Image (cartoon, rainbow, N blue to C red):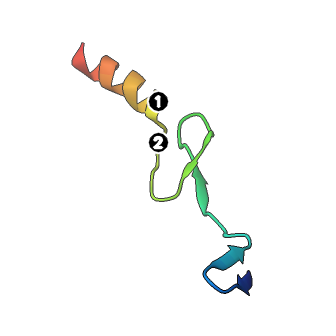
């Protein structure tokens, strides 16, 4: 992170690491904490209704 402080503003520039996981069904990259992506969840939900 780089910080520049001017008279009225603070400018911050840098990189932040985002942790990602994979869908357990199709292997698509999804946010961490989830185990299944939205598309696979919708498909599973439609099958369970029948």
Tell me whether circle 1 and circle 2 mark residues in contact (CB < 8 Å).
yes
Q: For the point 62% across and 39% down, which residue is it?
A: 28
Q: For the point 49% across and 38% down, which residue is it?
A: 37
Q: Quadrant of residue 33?
A: bottom left
The percent position of residue 36, horizontal first and vertical second, equals: 47, 42
Q: Is residue 47 above or below residue 1?
A: above
Residue placed under numbered mark 2 in the picture = 36
The percent position of residue 6, horizontal first and vertical second, equals: 70, 85
Number of the label disc, if any, that sits on residue 28: none
The answer to which of 49 and 33 lies nearer the viewer is 33
Q: Quadrant of residue 9?
A: bottom right
Element at label 2: loop
Element at label 1: helix
The percent position of residue 30, horizontal first and vertical second, equals: 56, 47
46 to the left or right of 31? left
- Badge 2: residue crowd in 10 Å (few <14, some 14–19, many ≥20): some
The answer to which of 46 and 31 lies nearer the viewer is 31
Residue placed under numbered mark 1 in the picture = 40
Distance from Cα at disc 1 to Cα at disc 2 = 6 Å
9 to the left or right of 41? right
Q: Is residue 17 above or below residue 46?
A: below
3 to the left or right of 18? right
The answer to which of 16 and 11 lies nearer the viewer is 11
- Badge 1: residue crowd in 10 Å (few <14, some 14–19, many ≥20): some
The percent position of residue 18, horizontal first and vertical second, equals: 62, 63
């Amino acid at each position: 992170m780089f910080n520049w402080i001017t008279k009225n503003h603070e400018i911050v520039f840098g990189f932040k690491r985002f942790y990602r996981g994979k869908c357990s069904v199709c292997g698509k990259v999804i946010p961490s904490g989830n185990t299944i992506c939205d598309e696979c969840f919708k498909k599973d939900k439609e099958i369970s209704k029948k």
